[in-house]
């Protein structure tokens, strides 16, 4: 398998993960650049040109809200999760945990076979 | 503020034009780029800004991420595009042939307009008609896709299934068949060239080649013979090439060459054609019959060409989707 193929599959896997990640991060009000840096600090990298369109889609669906604030020298758009967003996050986390559990069990089965 | 940043934002804005969130999206990107440049390079120097803009990505790709990803034609309808176009074009071709034969216009405004055409005009008209048919079918499928509802489109079946996108496997016997065909065509072509070299024609009224009597007058016979020999040669080359490759391009190119040669034959005036005496009242009927047969062959070759182009396109799509 080539790096390009892994990269393309990783992009697909990231889609769901990024939703959970952003909805979890936005328990605290944050703006885009700060979110990207925070995620980077945790050892994960999210492209800026992916993060902002995702934020827009989440906002359109009512899962997060936003407001412009004039901090320091320039305006910044701060986001926060809504109650609908929290419900969504809980649902996505359940799915994600269940997927992890299934993979763990299969790994255990494979280890027993070997 | 940097002109480069504004030019970049303007380019993104161009791709987002018509969308109500455009200005807000651009403001957010501007704010992000300026902050990143300032924090990560300690100033808004042009070089640092260039780096940050380059890292953000090409304007078109950035804009595309804000656009909903609905395709112009849904993947499930791509096969309908080719099948429906084939059906519409088949009708178009039949009506075009009728327009030539009956010397009539066919108008169904605004969907169809086939003026009264001569044979050559008809041959020129058909490729344009194909593109128009493809466009109309694509437009209908576009509207069906954009409606976003579940629509079950009818799926007419043909005797020849253009869905077969796999390259057909070539058995030993099919290769033998192609080889025999190639040998026969080489023999036919060689014999035609031999006759032409000796008699300047390949059409005779008798089969005794020692005292051959040409069917056509010298000039007409020479030209028609050369065109027919070229057709034999094209078929021979096509068969020989098909021994080594299974590409549909070979058939498509062979179709195009045949169409060009049939076109040349159709251009002939067919006056003073025969060396033998033909009753005056029969001549127009013979001319009409000849043109009709040639036009019919041209129609069959055109349909075969369309089939080959569709199969080539479908194979390309299948490879791309894999």
Image: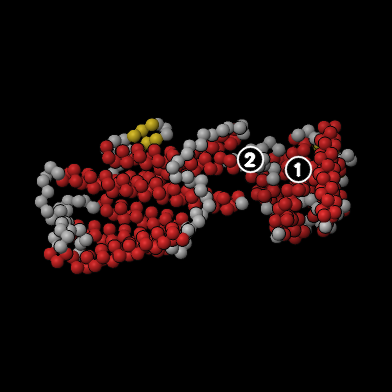
Hey, which residue is sitting farthest right in the picture?
A28
Front residue of B321/A45: it is B321
Contact, mark 1 vs mark 2 (Cβ under 8 Å):
no
- Is B200 on the left or on the right of B151, as rendered? left
Q: Residues within 10 Å of mark 1 (few under 14, many from 20)?
A: some
Residue visible at 43% across and 38% down in the picture: B88
Q: For the point 36% across and 47% down, which residue is it?
A: B300
State the count of labels. 2
- Residue at 75% over, 58% down: B51
Pointer 2 residue: B70
Q: Secondary structure at mark 2?
A: loop
User: 10 Å neighbourhood of mark 2: few (<14), some, or many (≥20)?
Assistant: few
Q: Is residue B263 left or right of residue B16?
A: left
Indicate the chain on which mark 2 is placed: B
Q: Residue at x 23, y 45 (%)?
A: B289
- Could you tell me residue B40's position as x and y percent? 83, 57
According to the image, label 1 marks what residue? A54
Q: Is residue A30 visible?
A: no
């Amino acid at each position: 398998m080539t790096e390009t193929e892994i990269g393309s599959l990783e992009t697909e896997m990231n889609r769901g993960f990024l939703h959970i990640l952003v909805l979890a991060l936005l328990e605290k009000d944050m703006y885009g650049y700060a979110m990207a840096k925070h995620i980077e600090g945790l050892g994960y990298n999210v492209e800026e040109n992916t993060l902002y369109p995702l934020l827009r889609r989440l906002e359109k669906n009512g899962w997060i809200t936003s407001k412009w604030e004039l901090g320091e020298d320039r305006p910044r758009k701060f986001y926060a999760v809504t109650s609908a967003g929290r419900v969504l996050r809980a649902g996505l986390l359940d799915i994600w945990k269940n997927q992890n559990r299934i993979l763990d069990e299969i790994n255990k089965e494979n280890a027993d076979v070997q | 503020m940097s002109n480069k940043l504004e030019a970049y934002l303007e380019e993104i804005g161009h791709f987002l034009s018509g969308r109500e969130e455009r200005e807000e999206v651009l403001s957010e990107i501007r704010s992000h780029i300026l902050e990143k440049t300032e924090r990560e390079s300690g100033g808004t120097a042009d070089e640092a800004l260039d780096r940050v803009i380059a890292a953000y990505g090409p304007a078109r790709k950035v804009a595309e991420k804000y656009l909903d990803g609905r395709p112009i034609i849904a993947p499930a309808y791509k096969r309908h595009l080719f099948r429906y176009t084939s059906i519409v074009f088949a009708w178009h071709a039949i009506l075009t042939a009728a327009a030539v034969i009956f010397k009539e216009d066919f108008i169904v405004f605004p969907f169809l307009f086939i003026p009264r055409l001569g044979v050559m005009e008809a041959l020129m008209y058909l490729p344009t008609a194909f593109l128009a048919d493809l466009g109309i079918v694509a437009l209908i499928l576009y509207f069906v896709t954009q409606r976003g509802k579940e629509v079950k489109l009818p799926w007419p079946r043909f005797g020849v299934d253009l869905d077969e996108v796999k390259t057909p496997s070539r058995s030993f016997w099919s290769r033998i068949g192609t080889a025999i065909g190639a040998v026969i065509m080489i023999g036919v072509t060689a014999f035609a060239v031999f006759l032409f070299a000796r008699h300047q024609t390949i059409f005779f009224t008798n089969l005794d080649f020692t005292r051959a009597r040409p069917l056509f007058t010298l000039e007409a016979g020479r030209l028609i013979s050369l065109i027919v020999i070229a057709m034999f040669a094209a078929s021979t080359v096509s068969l020989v090439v098909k021994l080594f490759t299974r590409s549909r391009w070979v058939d498509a190119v062979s179709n195009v060459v045949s169409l060009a040669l049939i076109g040349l034959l159709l251009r002939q005036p067919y006056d003073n054609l025969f060396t033998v005496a033909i009753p005056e009242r029969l001549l127009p009927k013979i001319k009409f019959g000849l043109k009709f047969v040639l036009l019919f062959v041209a129609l069959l070759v055109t349909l075969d060409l369309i089939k080959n182009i569709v199969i080539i396109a479908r194979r390309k799509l299948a490879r791309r989707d894999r």
